[in-house]
Image (spheres, rainbow, N blue to C red):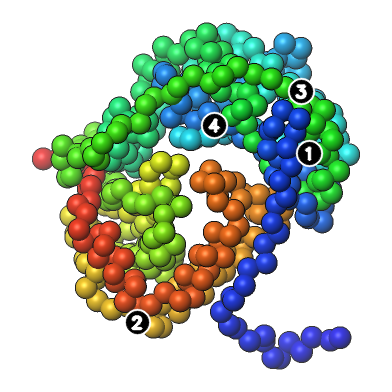
Amino acid sequence: MLIDRNNPPKLGPVQKLHALEPTLHHLSNRIPVYLLETGEQDIIRIDVIFQAGSRYQQKTFQAASANTLLSEGTLSKSARQIADELDFYGSYINPGSDRDESHIQLYSLNKFLPSTLDIAADIIKNPIFPENELNIFRQKRLQAMAIENQKVEFRARKTFIRTLFGEQHPYGIIGEPQDIKEISRDEIIDFHASFYHPTQCSILLSGRKAGDFLPLLEERFGNWTGSVEKPGILFPTGPEQTPATYDIREEVPGAVQAAIRIGGIMPIKSHEDFSGLSIVNTILGGYFGSRLMQNIREDKGYTYGVGSSLFSFKEKGFFMISTDVSQEYYKETMNECFNEIDRLCTDTLSISELSRVRQYIEGELLRQLDGPFNLADTFRSLLTFGLDFAFLKTFLNVLNHITPQDIQNLATKYFDSNPLIKVVAGIPTE
């Protein structure tokens, strides 16, 4: 049938999400395997995920060092051999570590997976963390930190996070050069032995005919055993820590811009208000047509970009406005940020603006479910909180039924009554 391109399809709200639900399997040692069998290309992605983020470390940089150095040598292969073999098969391994989790991500053609999975399993189970590779890692990280510490945006975010959570909180600890100098090979080995084992592990298998490789995962990981994990840094109990100050100004020698970060603690993804707050955040600064962009970039011309985001760790969430502006406009920019927050709390949102935001968010939801690896990324972001794709269906229901009054009530509940931290790095030198 020919398509009549003179008549575009009718636009309407997304009423239902068609997300492929992963199926849950278990290896013999009870490692959960989440299977997303979809896609048109013969490419497989395997995410091996560990509860081994920085919140579990006893010493700063243990988690990041252990994760980064996994592929730098095993009992049977050098770093060069590992790299050459992966290159031969056209595959690659992507390590990653954040506050709550660490992972190893393998991309491989289906036909080469038996060989490439051998390499991935070897680096996960048998790394040796060579001293020479640790020294190279130290030097690279120290160089990167020296560059980062000259940037106002890095300084502002670091100060903001430390102020928000507290410098000794598992989410507020940010490493300094001395920390990376002091990390030892034995401490990295100890962290790996404590947290890279089956009881801390889950696997996400995605791609075309991915289910055919469940027996392969069983062969490589099903008989794997490991030790019991050690406790990480303890989370504070009792009332929330109150920052000593909510308003911080920092001079940065040589800076020509000021980096602004404004925000505070917010609910995590599993909280009942998170979906509605995500919509509030989108209106304020979550997309190019947001109020912050229209005011501070388009109308005032203070910056090229300004935005706001909701971040959710496993135990804590937070909201943050971020922008970099010319130093002479930093006070005016901060005033406009708070003006827009106040407008959300006091003025009723128009139906046309709410409709525009709905359409944008619906498009983003559909994009997150387009293709096997977008599906895998989306599912991984939910798995941390014990959620699945039912969360997205609930979110869509909230999106389709939220009212301007609901928006105002949420903004008032979370912004009007909670003091927000204000950090500016790169203020003009007096």
> Which mark lies nearer to you, 3 or 4?
3
Quadrant of the image for the C terminus?
Answer: top left
Residue neighbourhood size for the residue with mark 4, other residues' Cα within 10 Å, grouped as few (<14), some (14–19), many (≥20): many
Mark 4 and mark 2 residues within 8 Å of each other at the beta carbon: no
Q: Please, what secondary structure does the residue beneath circle 3 have?
A: loop
Q: Nearer the viewer, residue 222 or 70?
A: 222
Three-letter code, disc 4: Gln
Residue at mark 2 to residue at mark 3: CA–CA distance = 59 Å
Mark 1 and mark 2 residues within 8 Å of each other at the beta carbon: no
Mark 3 and mark 4 residues within 8 Å of each other at the beta carbon: no
Residue at mark 3 to residue at mark 4: CA–CA distance = 20 Å
Q: Position of residue 239 (x, y in %)?
A: 23, 39
The part of the image, by quadrant, that contains residue 220 is top right
Residue neighbourhood size for the residue with mark 3, other residues' Cα within 10 Å, grouped as few (<14), some (14–19), many (≥20): few
The residue carrying mark 3 is 223
The residue carrying mark 4 is 51
Residue shown at 37%/26% (left/top)?
234
Which of the two discs, 4 and 2, labels the residue nearer the N terminus? 4
